[in-house]
Image (cartoon, rainbow, N blue to C red):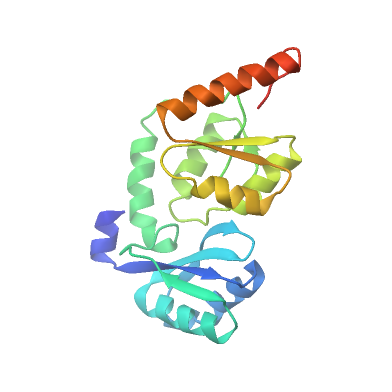
Amino acid sequence: MKEEGDSNPGGMAAVIGLDDEALERLCQDVSDKGIVRPANYNSPGQTVISGDLAALSAAIELAVERGARKVVRLAISIASHSPLMRHAADHFNTVLSQVRLYDAAVPVIANISAKAITSADDIRRELADQITSSVRWSQSVRAMAEGGVHTIVEVGPGEVLSGLSRRISRDLQAVSVNSTDALQQFVARVKEIEGSRRGAPAV
């Protein structure tokens, strides 16, 4: 993706205060300037757009004109999750085709479709296609909530996804596990909940 950005510079911007349909229409309206697409549907009213520099600049200007509360250009020189990453996706797909994958024992919520998948072929396809496609985080979180999930655990530094999840569904509890201590505390908490539910899974 870095190599792609060097040969075909692009960028990304966070748009706050426009709904998905309005932002998709906006991107279409500046398509004469180049490629720009929604890249990350982070939460209701917060979406990241991605594309080549001319189209991105036009989209930022138009978003402000159409009432976006805030537009922030991200400090990044690539157009992630857009068609500009086509060659990177092809490269990745070539490598991925040499890796043996197995069907998932636990369903995986896919970034692109926001649906639960288990087959190795579906997982392989989603892994490759997500490089050029929009990340539908809002839809994915809703799919989890509708599927009976009540606790989301974010593993890794920061609490960005936990915060976004709370905005998407108030029925979900989002937990951030970003240290060894936090992991131990979470495991102890899960065991306590499991005990109170007489063995019923906590997450």
Q: Is residue 102 visible?
A: no
Q: Quadrant of residue 53?
A: bottom left
Q: Does the rendering let one see residue 12?
A: yes
Question: Which residue lies at the image location 44% right of the left edge and 61% below the top edge?
Answer: 82
Give the residue at x 68% y 40%.
144
Instruction: Answer with the quarter of the image where residue 28 lies.
Output: bottom right
Nearer the observer, 134 or 75: 75
In screen coordinates, is 159 left or right of 17? left
Q: Is residue 42 left or right of residue 93?
A: right
* Position in image of residue 39 (x %, y %): 49, 61
Q: Is residue 198 above or below residue 166?
A: above
Tell me: residue 133, above or below residue 70.
Answer: above
| Residue 21: percent from left, percent from top | 66, 70
Report which quarter residue 80 is drawn in: bottom left
In-image side of 144 versus 77 (left or right)? right
Rendered-image quadrant of the C terminus? top right
What residue is at 65 percent from the left and 35 percent from the top?
Answer: 151
Q: Count how many numbered circles sit on residues in the image.
A: 0
Q: Residue at x 36, y 31 (%)?
A: 98
Pinpoint residue 178: horizontal percent, then vertical percent. 44, 35
Q: Nearer the viewer, residue 42 or 181?
A: 181
Q: Position of residue 199 (x, y in %)?
A: 72, 13
